[in-house]
Amino acid sequence: MVVGFDPGAPPPFKLSDIRAAIPNHCWVKDPWRSMSYVVRDVVVVFGLAAVAAYFNNWAVWPLYWFAQGTMFWALFVLGHDCGHGSFSNDPKLNSVVGHLLHSSILVPYHGWRISHRTHHQNHGHVENDESWHPLSEKIYKNLDNATKKLRFTLPFPMLAYPIYLWNRSPGKTGSHFHPDSDLFVPSERKDVITSTVCWTAMVALLVGLSFVMGPLQLLKLYGIPYLGFVTWLDLVTYLHHHGHEQKLPWYRGEEWSYLRGGLTTLDRDYGWINNIHHDIGTHVIHHLFPQIPHYHLIEATEAAKPVLGKYYREPQKSGPLPFYLLGVLLRSMKKDHYVSDTGDVVYYQTDPELN
């Protein structure tokens, strides 16, 4: 925590100042390098599955579930890069690779890509942000007690992603699968239908595999790693916007800007997992400039730090595995419940009755 520093104060620099500090080569997208990460991850995914199926004993399965769940998450991050266009400059390549990667882990590529774009364009805005945005006091207090408990009691929030895909967050309506959802404009209808068809094809493939290998084996090889992937996704995305030791602002109205909203995001260190999930922990620069390929984010962040100054919050160093983040998550769930219905710069408040 920086004493005497107000994180909600307008920064003394512009977005263009940060951009100018980042070396030119950090913006260059190399499709061959991007594809090499896809090949690496796919080989690891199939290799892990083959090893687990070969040994097929309870000493191996828990290790497999953790490893494969992490790899599913790595596949998601590469598909995420396709959605941002940081994978390559070829929209068709991005779309094909993004569909293959995301459909394989039951994510509707275009539906998610569009809502995630909304998240980036409105990061830090109380009402307009798309994912893990705060509940207003009015919406929070209108939730029934069971919903409040589920939203803020682990492990339930860490399993929210499939529900979000179907129903979005409290206070918002629409589905990532339906072309007429509030998330989309008419020109995106074909894209949304395409992704929903791909998602349906993957579900059909899984049903077929359950008849071939049996539902229990499919659950062990795919179902439980899928839940691991969902947990990784919810954990990482939540902690990139919550849990700092100093309360960080959320904005409305004229106080919000793309720069100020992006500066409320947080970098996180995941130890050995950093390389596996493609340095998604270098989140601040990614949020401000999602066009930068993941393999340049660390260098770009280092170059931007002198400009960002106190607005950059150095992440806590992790051990080999980021167990420390569980404590950060627990503390945030106990205190970050809602924000005021009024005011253009607001901070999380705590419901003492929930705890």
Image (tube, helix red, strand yellow):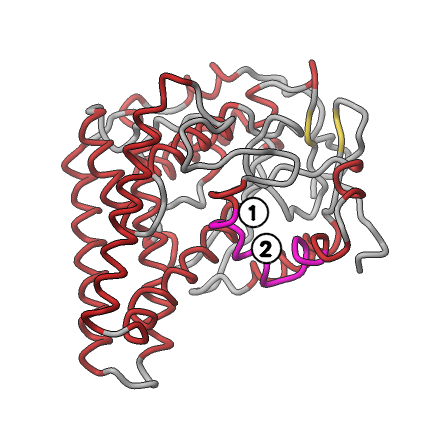
Residue 294 shows in this picture: no
Q: Which residues are magenta?
A: 149-163
Residues packed near mark 2 inside 10 Å, few (<14), some (14 to 19) or many (20 plus): some
**Along the line of sight, the residue nearer the viewer: 82 or 12:** 82
Asked whether the residues under the numbered discs 2 and 1 touch, taking CB atoms below 8 Å apart as contact, a structural biologist would say yes
Gap between marks 2 and 1, in whole Å?
9 Å
**Can you give x and y, in whole percent of width and height, for residue 118 in the image?**
49, 26
Q: Residue at x 51, y 45 (%)?
A: 237
Whether residue 129 appears in magenta in the rendering, the answer is no
**Can you give x and y, in whole percent of width and height, for residue 68 in the image?**
32, 64
Q: Residue at x 14, y 37 (%)?
A: 32
Residues packed near mark 1 inside 10 Å, few (<14), some (14 to 19) or many (20 plus): some
Secondary structure found at label 1: helix
Q: Residue at x 70, y 17 (%)?
A: 253
> Does residue 21 sit above or below 243 in this rendering?
above
**Can you give x and y, in whole percent of width and height, for residue 115 in the image?**
46, 31
Please state if 39 lies on the left or on the right of 281 as rendered: left
Main secondary structure along the magenta-highlighted residues: helix
In the rendered image, the quadrant that contains the N terminus is top right
Amino acid type assigned to the residue bearing label 1 in the image = Tyr
Residue 238 is tagged as: 1
Answer with mark 2 or mark 1, whichever residue precedes in sequence.
2
Residue 157 is tagged as: 2
